[in-house]
Image (spheres, rainbow, N blue to C red):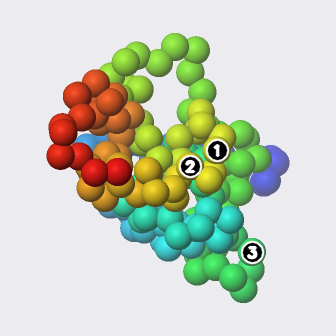
Amino acid sequence: MNIEARNDAIILMKLKSYLNFDPDHPTWAFIADNILRKNISPKFGAADPKTLISPFLQSWYPKLREGSTSVPLSLHKLLRIGTKYEICLDALEVDQNTKNILPIWYHIGIPIPQLWNSKWANCQKHKHNILTVGQMKEYIETPIPPNHTN
């Protein structure tokens, strides 16, 4: 028996549970998300925690270097195995409803890290409470009121 493959398979099943974003999302996954948010890599600047959903759905990642992180070993292994097997959102065709519920901030399809903490982005996040692609689509399709400030 290949012990390494067996251990990877166990962690992959835990990762499958973590990546279940249905209403029955496991409680431990919410705790894991909070730990990961608190350990975002400094490369991403002062990220707003409410915009950080999952490093598997977005382009951010937590710091994992020993001594500079509070990510527990079990969660570190989960991320390492996810990276090893290139776990990511990868679909041939994504329906519009799924696209609309994806997080807009740190979107995996927009490789412009400077955008996420710009004045415009902060306005969208904090004044307009935009968190998803669908909310952004709805916002840009609505006429800008005359009293709107930049």
Q: Secondary structure at mark 3?
A: loop
Between the residue at mark 2 and the residue at mark 3, the CA separation in whole angstroms equals 26 Å
Q: Is residue 147 left or right of residue 4?
A: left
Instruction: Tell me how far mark 1 sits from mark 3, CA to CA.
Output: 24 Å
Depth check: 92 or 147 in front?
Answer: 147
- Which amino acid type is shown beneath numbered disc 3? Arg
Number of marks drawn? 3
Q: Amino acid at mark 1?
A: Ile
Query: Label 3: few (<14), some or many (≥20) within 10 Å?
Result: few
Q: Residues within 10 Å of mark 1 (few under 14, many from 20)?
A: few
Mark 2 secondary-structure assignment: helix
Is 97 located above or below residue 33 in the figure? Answer: above
> Looking at the rendering, which quadrant does residue 92 occupy?
top right
Residue assigned mark 1 = 112
Q: From the viewer's perspective, is 13 left or right of 77?
A: left
Residue drawn 81% across the image and 48% down it:
2
What residue is rendered at 53% in x and 70% in y? 46
Q: Residues within 10 Å of mark 2 (few under 14, many from 20)?
A: some
Q: Give, as a three-letter code, the residue at label 2.
A: Leu
Is 33 located above or below residue 21 in the figure? below
* Closest to the observer, 67 or 127: 127
Marker disc for residue 65: 3
Give yes or no for contact between labels 1 and 3 (Cβ–Cβ under 8 Å). Answer: no
Q: Which residue is mark 2?
A: 115
